[in-house]
Image (cartoon, helix red, strand yellow):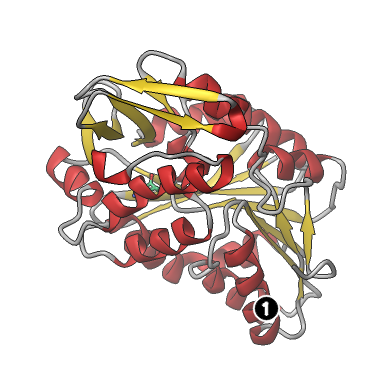
Amino acid sequence: MLPQLVKILNDSYQAVKNDGQDVIAGLTKNPKTLPPKYFYDDYGSELFEQICELPEYYPTRTETSILEKCADEIAELTGSKELVELGSGSSTKTRLLLDAYQKIGNSFTYIPTDVSGGILKTSVLELQEKYPYFSIQGLLGTYEETLAYLESTPAPTRTICFLGSSAGNFSPEKFDHFLTQIARSLQPGNYFLLGIDLHKPKEILESAYNDAQGITAAFNLNMLSHLNWRFQGNFDLNLFSHQAIYNQAESQIEMRLYCQENVTFSLENLDLKVNFQAGENILTEISRKFDLGILQTKLEAKGLKVKKVWIDPKKWFGLILCQA
Ligand code: AVI
């Protein structure tokens, strides 16, 4: 790790808190669930990068096409000297914004933040080379940890961006809490840029999360490998299969791992035994799809005033710029 470039927000190596209480709570519930943050060990982050390139996975491509058109305008409107990105991964799309801020020529700090140390370190090094006049400061931590840190370090011209519709992976209650934390991390006049996946036909959504090459399946199953490594577990990945369905009533993709046999696994470090019946599943992720109008009302209610919205011609994806 590079202490001068990547600040670690908690004690564990890969920042995902490793007390595992959330794993115990999820696996002892009926139906079983696991928090999506456990997708993102280094291999999971790599798989996610591959997902973003898949022909069926439209969100990354669509958001990039919007950013290509509006990045300059965002840089001009915000005039920010600090851009914080939550869940930055490889920061690929963000380079469009960084190029735009570079044109303005202010002194500028980019703060990518992620739970995965490997991808954060690699992208900080790459960005440092590509943008030698910027200060690049990685933050390794969960969203909660990052936002708590930002709250304690206010900045007069800050923009926080949250791209890729990762907000869709929160339950409505968690999203509400997240927006409260965002509002607290911004001073009046600061900006929040939110990338959001919109309603669309079920067939398009289901093929995006059940791709033909099986990369999303590998990404889903990798969560169990991550738990095996982190908590000395013995999940047998061959006994699980991936499925993603669109729940129309909730407007959300639901991604699950189905267990094919009656079997018991253990996670030694958590002192936990988990029984499965054949056909039982674990809900590993929801990915909510939003209505722009409802979302705008919600943002405004949190004190985040919507300044401008950009959407693609098919109306599949939106970028919302709010001001605190
Ligand atoms: C990170 N997040 C926005 C992705 C999504 O589309 O909900 C995670 C993902 N899961 C499967 N494919 C992509």
Q: Residue most toward the top?
A: 30
In which image quadrant can residue 214 be found? Answer: bottom left
Label 1's element? Answer: helix
**Which class describes the residues within 10 Å of circle 1: few (<14), some (14-19), or many (20+)?**
some
What number of labels is visible? 1
Above or below 179: residue 43: below
Mark 1 C-beta closer than 8 Å to ligand 1: no
- Residue at image position (32%, 67%) is 53
Whether residue 91 sits left or right of residue 121 in the image: it is left
In which image quadrant can residue 265 be found? Answer: top left
- Residue at image position (53%, 48%) is 229
- Residue at image position (50%, 27%) is 297
- 276 or 25: nearer the eye? 276
Q: Position of residue 133 (x, y in %)?
A: 77, 83
Q: Quadrant of the N terminus?
A: bottom right
Whether residue 12 sits left or right of residue 143 in the image: it is right
- 274 or 150: nearer the eye? 274
Q: Position of residue 36 (x, y in %)?
A: 47, 39
Whether residue 158 sits left or right of residue 210 in the image: it is right
- Residue at image position (49%, 39%) is 233
Above or below 204: residue 245: above
- Residue type at mark 1 is Leu
Whether residue 188 sits left or right of residue 222 in the image: it is right
Q: Quadrant of the C terminus?
A: top right
Residue at the spot of label 1? 125
Could one spot residue 174 in this view of the protein? no
- 91 or 193: nearer the eye? 91
In which image quadrant can residue 178 be found? Answer: top right
Could one spot residue 26 in this view of the protein? yes
Q: Residue most toward the left?
A: 203
Q: Position of residue 193 (x, y in %)?
A: 57, 50
Q: Position of residue 88 (x, y in %)?
A: 57, 59
